[in-house]
Amino acid sequence: MKLTVVGCSGSFPSAESACSSYLVEADGFRLLLDMGNGALGELQRHIGLYDLDAVFLSHLHADHCIDMCGYFVARYYRHDGGRCEAIPVYAPEGAEQRLTTAYADTPSDKSMSEVFDFHTLKPGVFEIGPFSVRTEKVAHPVETFGIRIEHGGRSLTYSGDTGVCEALVDLAEGTDLFLCEAAFTHGKEDIPDLHLNGREAGAHAARAGVGRLVLTHIPPWTDAERNLADARHVFGGPVELAAPGAVYEL
Ligand SMILES: [Zn+2]
Ligand SMILES: [Zn+2]
């Protein structure tokens, strides 16, 4: 299993990175986790525009899904005059309507579903291509799912956006790589059920006994090095900051 960080900026893009988007590949299958602002452009540094096999959207905040509107254009109005087949899109309830509204003038209310086969997420276990996945609701103001992906005896877990969350500890238990958001700063922002700080991300990783922690979704106005130090303070395993283009072989 190969993980590529397409974009990792939290809430809005930075000068260096697009918003949340992570490419997971195995057996030639390509699954994208989230497609936030700027991700569609960055994605094309790594794979062709039409090489995706499935998309997972953790939630419907713009910094996780808004580039699906641009991707709709690319798939619906192909340069060669054809139209792409629908690829599966696993997303919270209401995704099709939300993206259709965001786009504003799709030919019909059903146009999105001609190129995206929407599947409504629920907590549970299912397959996406060669991956065994498990989803759980995490703690965020809108319905949001964390995801654990397993393949060939290896696993990665992505938090989505979340505050302190027992279900996330459970989801990440013993995972090889834990891609966990750390948008807040310890001692500065303390709003329940919104985001984790570095210390909390580290604590979740420690309790789950993960192999490696990668901090992500850090907004441009947050001191990433401070969050890294805070996470290291409470988690003894390897910790690093996600960076655009970073590749992890699992
Ligand atoms: Zn976000
Ligand atoms: Zn969010």
Image (cartoon, rainbow, N blue to C red):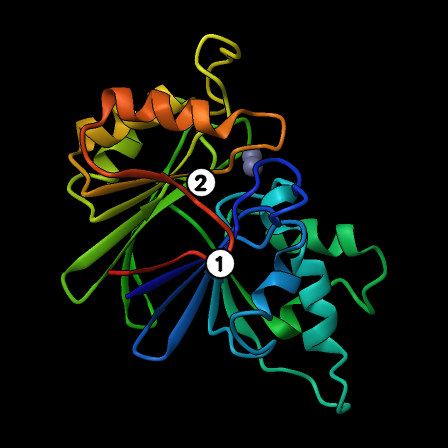
Tell me the element at label 2: loop
Residue drawn at (67%, 56%) of the image:
67
Badge 2 crowding class, 10 Å Cα cut-off, few under 14, some 14 to 19, many 20 or more, is: many
Q: Amino acid at mark 1?
A: Gly
Q: Nearer the viewer, residue 236 or 19?
A: 236
Residue drawn at (68%, 44%) of the image:
15
Q: Earlier in the sequence, mark 1 or mark 2?
A: 2
Note whether ligand 2 is within 8 Å of mark 2.
Answer: yes
x, y percent for residue 79: 77, 86
Res 211 quadrant in image: top left
Residue drawn at (66%, 38%) of the image:
12
Query: Eyeballing the image, is 75 above or below 128?
Result: below
Residue denoted by label 2: 160
Task: Give the Cα separation between the discs numbered 1 and 2.
Answer: 19 Å
Eye-nearest disc, 1 or 2: 1
Q: Quadrant of ligand 1?
A: top right
Q: Nearer the viewer, residue 159 or 226?
A: 226
- Answer left or right for 61 relative to 146: right
x, y percent for residue 65: 61, 50
Badge 1 crowding class, 10 Å Cα cut-off, few under 14, some 14 to 19, many 20 or more, is: some
Q: Nearer the viewer, residue 48 or 84?
A: 48
Q: Amino acid at mark 2?
A: Gly
Answer yes or no: is residue 165 visible. Answer: no
